[in-house]
Amino acid sequence: MSKYPQAVRRWPFPERCVHRGSHVTLEPLGQDHLHELWEAAADAEASWSFLRYGPPATIEALSALLTDLSSRDDQPFWAVRPDSSGRVEGWLSLCDVYPADAAIEIGSIWFSPRLQRSRAATETIYLLIRHAMDDLGYRRMVWRCAASNAASLRAAGRYGFRQEGVWRRAAIVKGAPRDVAWHSILDDEWPLHREAIEAWLSDDNFLSDGRPRASLDDIRASRQSIAPTEAAPAN
């Protein structure tokens, strides 16, 4: 029997609730995060290059942006609070949610320079993918970025997303046309990537100076190389 039911079904829409990890807490984005985010955004103009919005020139502009993002009914946003600092250092969302197709995207990610490339950043992405795929049962997770955004392309591959192709001049961002690269993780691919990310996040993988012993790519490759041994044919 196919695991895909014939009857019409709608997958649950993600709720705005708190997600707690071992190194980070995700809180529904709101005005109460304004001052911490304003401080995190200081001298970080380059971090906004590929977003449709920002950088905010004033705290009032950031406040208006938070009002917009936090009030979107079809796109829940979360503020990212790493345990290491105790202060909000960025945000991200689940967007382009298609409950009838079991498809969902993680996107509109803004991480401050302090949050980027950190253990908390990796756990942030992991928590929302795990919530969508494991808790809500979605079968397709999407990562979409500008084809010229080398950092986002590397991040997609690191988390295990498979590139599907590039839509040429598919978006206009800040007045400039951009090619858009599409990536996905499917439900039957997710368990391998989930196990690899969990192994990377484990305390056993980190040295006393905070550096990881093994990269996420290496951990995933080691798990992919382990295949069940076929039973020898009977005599």
Image: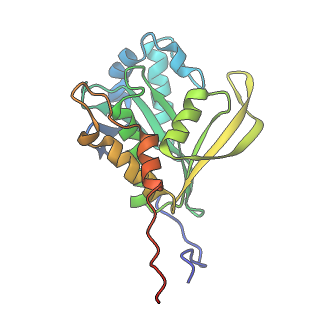
Question: Where is 218 relative to 190, above or below?
Answer: above
Q: Looking at this view, is 162 or 146 the one in front?
A: 162
Q: Quadrant of residue 144?
A: top right
Spot occupied by residue 21 in the image (x, y as percentages of width and height): 28, 43
Q: Looking at this view, is 61 or 203 the one in front?
A: 203
Q: Residue at x 37, y 20 (%)?
A: 114
Residue 219 visible? The answer is: yes
Give the colour scheme shown.
rainbow
Spot occupied by residue 31 in the image (x, y as percentages of width and height): 37, 28
Question: Where is 231 relative to 58, above or below?
Answer: below
Q: Looking at this view, is 177 or 227 the one in front?
A: 227
Q: Residue at x 42, y 54 (%)?
A: 223
> Given the current orientation, which residue lies at the most extreme bottom position?
235
| Left or right: residue 53 compared with residue 174 | left
> Given the current orientation, which residue lies at the most extreme right position?
168
Task: Point out the image quarter for the N terminus.
Answer: bottom right
Spot occupied by residue 75 in the image (x, y as percentages of width and height): 51, 44
Q: Looking at this view, is 102 or 231 the one in front?
A: 231
Spot occupied by residue 84 in the image (x, y as percentages of width and height): 24, 27
Q: Residue at x 51, y 46 (%)?
A: 160
> Given the current orientation, which residue lies at the most extreme front position?
235
Question: Where is 1 relative to 101, above or below?
Answer: below
> Given the current orientation, which residue lies at the most extreme left position?
208
| Left or right: residue 108 compared with residue 31 | right
| Left or right: residue 221 compared with residue 82 | right
